[in-house]
Image (cartoon, grey):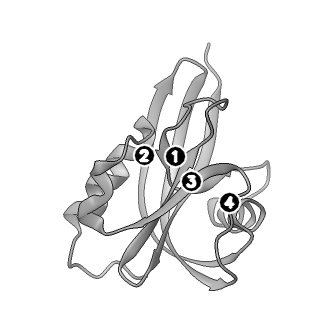
Amino acid sequence: MKKNIHVVGAVIEKANKILCVQRGGKKTLPLKWEFPGGKIEKGETPQQALFREINEEMKCKVEIGGYIDTTVYEYDFGIVHLSTYYCRIVEGSPVLTEHIAMKWLNRDQLSSLDWAPADIPAIEKIERMKGLSHRR
């Protein structure tokens, strides 16, 4: 039986652009793009996990806004349950500590990147919501 892995992703917006980060070449899903985030630890809510992960991974603090989507995707290493939330930076600026690249893209540019499969449904939803209010 495959392991269930519960993770969160931050759709960080700034000046109508969204932060996208690229995984390293030696990690699982090498060189794929994703929203920053990570695993939910035991006893954490998704929002607590997201706040902690962005603080650890990107060295900045975010305010977590509206829920976007949860995707379940089966990879060879396990079944990923990815919940994404809109976020905005309230302190600091993103720094790469675990990723090899970052880009700020407009909504309509998101699908130009080679995304990790679990992130794609959220991207499609974000693109469809263009022009709609997505704040909480």
**If you read the primary sequence from the N terminus, does the residue marked by circle 2 or circle 4 appear first?**
4
- Give yes or no for contact between labels 2 and 4 (Cβ–Cβ under 8 Å): no
**If you read the primary sequence from the N terminus, does the residue marked by circle 3 or circle 4 appear first?**
4
Camera-nearest label, 2 or 1? 2
Residue at the image position 27 percent from the left and 60 percent from the top = 109
Which quadrant holds residue 94? bottom right
Instruction: Quote the CA–CA distance across marks 4 and 1.
Output: 21 Å
Q: Amino acid at mark 3?
A: Ala
Residue 32 higher or lower than 47, as above or below: above
Say which quadrant the N terminus sits in: top right
Give the residue at mark 4: 96
Residue at the image position 78 percent from the left and 62 percent from the top = 56
The local secondary structure at tag 1 comes to strand
Within 10 Å of disc 4 (Cα), the crowding (few <14, some 14-19, many 20+) is some
Q: Can you name the residue that lies furthest to the top here?
A: 1
Q: Amino acid at mark 1?
A: Leu
Total count of labels? 4
Residue 82 - label = 1
Give the residue at mark 3: 101
Residue 116 higher or lower than 113, as above or below: above
- Give yes or no for contact between labels 2 and 1 (Cβ–Cβ under 8 Å): yes
**Left or right placement of residue 35 versus residue 55 in this view:** left
